[in-house]
Image (tube, rainbow, N blue to C red):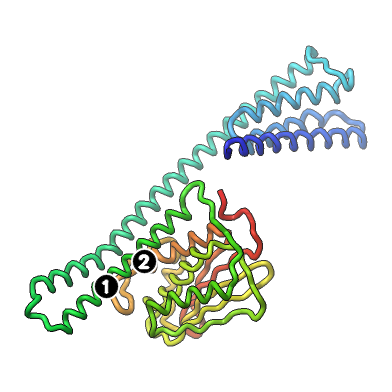
Amino acid sequence: MGLNNHKRRNCVFMLLVLLAAFLVNLLLLELFGTRTMIPMIFVLGVMVVAYYTDGYFWGIAASLCSVLAVNYAFTYPYWAFDLISPECISAAVVMLVVATLTSTLTTKLKRQEQMKAEAENERMRGDLLRAVSHDLRTPLTSIYGACSVMLENYDELPKEKHMKLLADVCADAQWLVRMVENLLSITRVGGEGVKLTKKETVLEELTDAVLVKFQKHYPGQKVQLSLPEEFVSIPMDAMLIELVLINLLENAVYHAHGMKNLWLKAYVKGQRAYFQVEDDGCGIPPDRLPRLFSGLLESAPIRDTSRSSMGIGLSVCSAIVKAHGGKITAWNRPQGGAVFRFWLEMEENDHGKQ
């Protein structure tokens, strides 16, 4: 189905370009009475078709159609075919050569770009795997160590120590679950042929669901909510956008050292809905800002454990927002702390659909 649509687009594009060339030639002929530009305009059209379509077929087809158009409408006898004339044969040869050379060059360029993109994707996959391996090793080691201590010293350890070790194991396991969810989200929005299921979602219902889930895991962290007074509905995959907002809130909990206030804000500007998570903590190191959403951040201590999930979590946020056709950014507040903001289109479009 997708292949047929691609062929249909190429065909429509070729016909539109040739029609435009034909009409331009008729206009020039009517205004200036000159025929000298006719072959060059059709050659230009053939080059455009060959460059912006795939393979050789459409360029060659455009060259043959151009020869027929020139022969029929712009060569004596007018509005009749004379396919054996030397002018027709020479024009056909020239246009076929132009189409073939242009298609060859375009095919090589596209192949090189594809190979470069595949190499970059492979490099990013390798970097992501290394980052994930590093981030998973610490909580797994912690779980193993806590379980070993409890097994080897079961009778000697007091109940309070047992409870603390079990709480640490539970926290590490919970973090691992979140990491796996993030990785699954990356594969969902980063795969070929992905199609997001966008539905109209009420902004207030979305933020309520986010805060309920967040408070369940972080009951001691208050979030100050700011929403527009008017009713707002946004087309989105609500589950994925919830994940983005929860990741951003959790990022503040783990990394905003000294944070006293945490804000979740949403507002509408033009045809876009903006979401903003803001804190008054320590801010983001300036050297990390350029690669904050790449998933390639080096590990750094976080507030209550030695784990670091910021790189992976933020790369998930970036992938989800990008799949929705939006953009996510971050910067430091002048008065201290960090701001993460992303926007989504208020109206349904083709973003996020392949």
Q: Quadrant of residue 219?
A: bottom left
Q: Which residue is outermost to the bottom?
A: 260
Image point 25% across, 63% down: which residue? 137
322 with respect to 16 (left or right): left
Residue 102 percent location from the top left of the image: 62, 31
Residue 5 percent location from the top left of the image: 62, 38
Residue 347 percent location from the top left of the image: 66, 62
Residue 202 percent location from the top left of the image: 60, 71
Image point 9% across, 75% down: which residue? 154
* Label located before the other in sequence (1 or 2): 1
* Residue type at numbered disc 1: Cys
Q: Quadrant of residue 181?
A: bottom left
| Residue 291 visible somewhere in the drawing | no
* Residue type at numbered disc 2: Arg
The quarter in which the N terminus is drawn is: top right
- Disc 1/disc 2 C-alpha distance (Å): 12 Å
**Image vertical order of residue 10 relative to residue 267, above or below:** above
Q: Which residue is mark 1?
A: 170
**Image vertical order of residue 158 relative to residue 306, above or below:** below
Say the numbered circle drawn on residue 178. 2
151 with respect to 292 (left or right): left
CB atoms at circles 1 and 2 under 8 Å apart? no
Structural crowding at the residue carrying mark 1, measured as other residues with C-alpha within 10 Å and reported as few (<14), some (14–19) or many (≥20): few
Image point 71% across, 37% down: which residue? 12
Front-lying residue, 129 or 98: 129
Image point 57% across, 51% down: which residue? 353
Judged from the image, the secondary structure of the residue bearing numbered disc 1 is helix
**Image vertical order of residue 85 relative to residue 121, above or below:** above
